[in-house]
Every structure is written in structure tokens, then in C-alpha cells.
Amino acid sequence: MSSDIDKLAEKTANLSIDPVYDTNWCDMPAEIKLECIGKMKFKERMSSDIEHLTDTTEKLAIDPVYDTNWCDMPDDIKLECIRKLEFKERCSLRCTAKAEKSLVDSQKIEFFRGDVYKTNAFQFYESEIVSLTKMNGKEFSIKLENPQEALKFLNHILKIGVFEHFIISPENATVRQGLINYPGIISSKTIKFNFCGTEIVVAVLQKMKHGVEFISMYCSEEFDHDFDKILEILQIQNVPYWFCNYYHKTDSLHKVARMWIDTQAKVGFTFQVSVYKKGSFEEFSEHFTDRIVSKNEKRVRIRTNNPDCHILLERGTVRYYGYIEFFRLLVISVKMKESEYDDNCKEWIMDMDPTIRCDSYDFL
Amino acid sequence: MSSTEQGTSSAAPAEPTTAPESAAAPEVPESFYYVHGKDKVVHKVSAGALQHSALIHGMISNLGYTEEQAKANPFPFENIDGDILQMVVDWCNQHKGKPTPPEDTNLPKQKEKLFDLVLAVNYLEIKELLTYCCKQVAMMVKGKSPEEIREIWMIPTDAEDEAAEKEAKKRAGKEAAGETAAAAGDAK
């Protein structure tokens, strides 16, 4: 201890600083000092070691570290600042230097909505558009003439973005391929596929972070989905609410019900489909003849392997609305009485297809 | 507001002030602590104001100083410039016992001061003030292009960084060679 005090006295004399206080740094045991040094940032560590700092500044003959700027900030502070930057500024910052790029890319950013689509097909030059809406409603759109650039940007936003809603309607082959090959995880509470092929739907869904709350997919004759492939995806098996619009085959209902039976889906799970072809209801009934609990022209209720759950299929019809049929499939509690059924199909049909938000249609 | 005194030796004991309490509540004398920065100017700050700093609060809790001991042993923050510490002390006093507002417009706008303040606040672990400061730092580059950001925050380009790194390596090599030569000379 006395040798420490001697050293301390020598140091203070040499450095011409104020005398020693009763209790101070030098009285601290080594482990406490180490604990304190561990809490110090680079600059403070430099400052704490006065001799070292003096030596260094003398040798280098440069200004000491006090001309403070962004580059003097420790990474955790930089990250705190980056979290407060808007998306546009983050994009600018990541272009300044490699180190800043890597910091920006390490930070997630929340978006209310992300939308990948193509400009109006009637425009002479078609471009891929990536539109992002922040949680505060601010919008940011970027028109990407070059598909490679579009792909690069898309990869970036998929990597850093945490979305409430993500909508994919890619028409460009490069962008489509890029989405299929994207190596990371996509984080979004809901996802909507507009006229995408099964390949892209399957690939994207497999990359979705678990916990997706809602999935919707729009089909067309060109892009009719292969339900066998889609139903194998875990994210589809676990999503509590999903729908498929404008399907052209009659196999979706019984296949989804079979998947739910096999995976023991929970009460409340819902699947809705609009089909351009007649026969889905009948096909469902035929597949589950031995499980039917009750049946009429509007509903079929079947048993599952779980004694607590039934599956209810409901048909919703819109008079004078072409050939399309609407169906809702639900996992319900066995205790649910027929009197508790929801007879108003208008609401769930309109959720699926906002284009029929019109009083001139009769919902049966 | 804190009383500010030049040098530790001239620090005079201050009259304890009392926080306004309801008539029924007994008045508890407020304790004061002393801090100084690089300029050795001692700032007298109430324990209530210092509660904003997790670092100082932890030190106070562990030390259990009496008023006299606290006065005799100002907390030394040699790594913080005097004017920056003054700003921190002022902020702590202004926000003593108050909920912190969502915005703080009194922070310095000059970038050098702001960055120094950020470092000090980070060191002193004043979470709310750090949040304000970081927001202020972010505001500096609002709507700016990469070039403008590089200029405002003085971010070197990758090429400049590489050149600086090379230079540092070169210098370190020379120093090492010099030290070896000196050691060899001493051995002789």
C-alpha cells in the first residue's frame, strides 16, 4: 500500500495536478478499477491513462482526441442515433462508408407497409416500384428502372425491414427470381401475394419469420396455386387467418380441412376462398362423409381427431355476381351451437373482395 | 441551480435547501454532492438532480458519504470538459424530480459540443438526456445526401480510412523498430 502511495505521489508531482483526495481512484482495489475501466469508452480509457495519453500525443504530434465528431462515438451510441434516423437518411448514411453501412444494416426498421409492384402497364416505360410506409404514415417510394437495382434494394429492405404488412406483386422476372433466392428471413405480420405463382408464394412463405398473422393470395388462371405444395409450408399450417381469392379449382376446402385435422389446428383458425368453379362444397362433403356432424345446403360441420374441435364450412353467395362462390372454413369448439352461427356472410366476403362493397348485391 | 466554485479548496459548504413538500410531510434536508470536470471547477449538485445519472447514483449509494465527506471528495470526471459538465449539471437540475418531456430544445446545436455532450452523458449514464442528444445528432443530417452527411459528421471515405490505417501501421512499425534499437543500445 505504501509503495502505491509513493508511486501516486510521484505521479501527481510529475503531472502537476491537484493533491490527492482522501479517497480516490488510487485507493480503489484493482478489481474495482478494472470494473470501472470496463465501463469506460475508448476515449475515457485514453483519458484515464494520463501518462499513456501524454506519450501518445507527444509522439504523434497531433491534436488530442477532444475534437469530437461522429467517428469518435462508440458503436452503441452510433446505433442509438441511427435508430432515430428516418429511412431515407439511413440510406444516405450507409452510402458514406463501409463501417457506417454495416452499422445501418445491423439495425431493423419498422414499416407499416411495404409494397413491391410494377408501374401502370399502360405507361411506355414500365418500372418496378418499391413503396414503403413508415409507422407514422410517412411514405417513401423508389422507382427502379433497372431490375438489378430493384433487386438490390429489395434485398436491403427485406433484410432490415420489420413490416406490419407486406405486399408482393412482382411482374419482373429478375425481381421474382430475386425474391425466390433471397437468403434471409422476411419479417411481416401479414403478407399479400398479388397474382404470384406457387413457386414464389412457397419460396417467400418459407422465408417468413414465424408468427405470421394473416396471409392472402390472389390467383388467376395463369397463377392458380398448387395447394398440395402450399399446405406443406409451416407458416401456412400455423397462420390463424388466411385466404385465397379467385381460385379456379375445387380442391382447396377439403385439403385445408385435412391439413387442419392432421396438424390439430386451434379453435379460431380461419380460411376463406373465392372459387370460379362450382363443386368445392360438394367435394368437401364427399371427402368427409364419415366425419359429418351436420349438413345443410349452406353449411357442413365435421369432426376432427381432437374431441374439442370441429370444422365448419360455410358457403356465402352473392347474387348476380358472376360464377364466383365464396367459402369460409373455421375451426370451432365442439360446444358451439347452431344458434351461434354467424348468418351474415356479407362482412367476411367483403373482407376478401373489396370490389363488391356495393349495396346492389344480395348476400345470401 | 448549482453553485459553481473555482477549485476544490475554495468550495464552501452550502446551505442545505429543502424541496417543497406538502404541509403535513416532514421536511427532509436535501443532501448535496460535488463533481468536477477537466477544468477542476466544482459543481454542487443535489442528490435528487444526480439521480438522473446511473453512474453517480451508484457511486453515491455505495459510498454513503456524509455532507463533509462529499464536499471534501468531489467526484472527479477528468475526461469531461468543464463546460460540458456544466451543461449536464444544469440539465439534471432543470429536470430534478420532474418527468422528462418528449422533446428538449435546450441542447447545444454546435456539433462539437453536442458530440462531447453525448460522450459525457453516455459515460455518466443519463439515459433520458442521451436519448435527446442522439435525437439531436440524428436531426443534424435530416434530409441530407451521403456527401452532405459525410461532410457534417466528418466521416472519412473508405479510401481515406485505408490510407490512415496504412499510415498508422507504418508509424507503429517505425516506433517498434526505434524501441528495439533503443533496447539494444541500453543492453550494450
Image: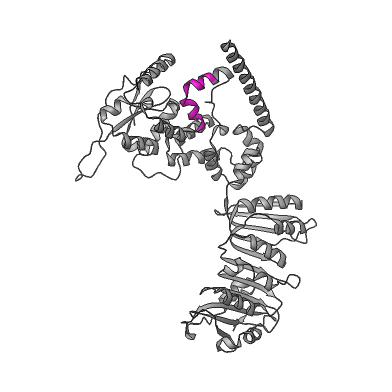
Q: Is residue A96 left or right of residue A16?
A: right
Where is residue A160? Give x, y as percent.
61, 50
Quarter where residue B38 is shown = top left
Residue shown at 68% from the left, 84% from the top: A279
The quadrant of the image that shows the C terminus of chain B is top right
Q: Which residues are magenta?
A: A40-55
Quarter where residue B80 is shown = top left
Q: Indicate whether A137 appears above or below A192.
A: above
| Furthest residue in direction right, as rendered | A124
Q: Is residue B183 left or right of residue A333?
A: right
Q: Indicate whether A256 appears above or below A143.
A: below
The quadrant of the image that shows the N terminus of chain B is top left
Where is residue B41? Give x, y as percent.
38, 23
Tally of marks? 0
Quarter where residue B138 is shown = top right
Q: Indicate whether B100 appears above or below A200.
A: above
Please say whether residue A358 is visible from this viewpoint. Answer: no
Is the magenta region chiefly helix, strand or loop?
helix
Where is residue A113? Give x, y as percent.
60, 58
| Furthest residue in direction front, as rendered | B188
| Furthest residue in direction top, as rendered | B188
Say whether residue A45 is magenta: yes
Q: Nearer the viewer, residue B89 or B177?
A: B177
Residue shown at 52% from the left, 42% from the top: A80
Where is residue A31? Give x, y as percent.
41, 33
Please say whether residue B178 is visible from this viewpoint. Answer: yes
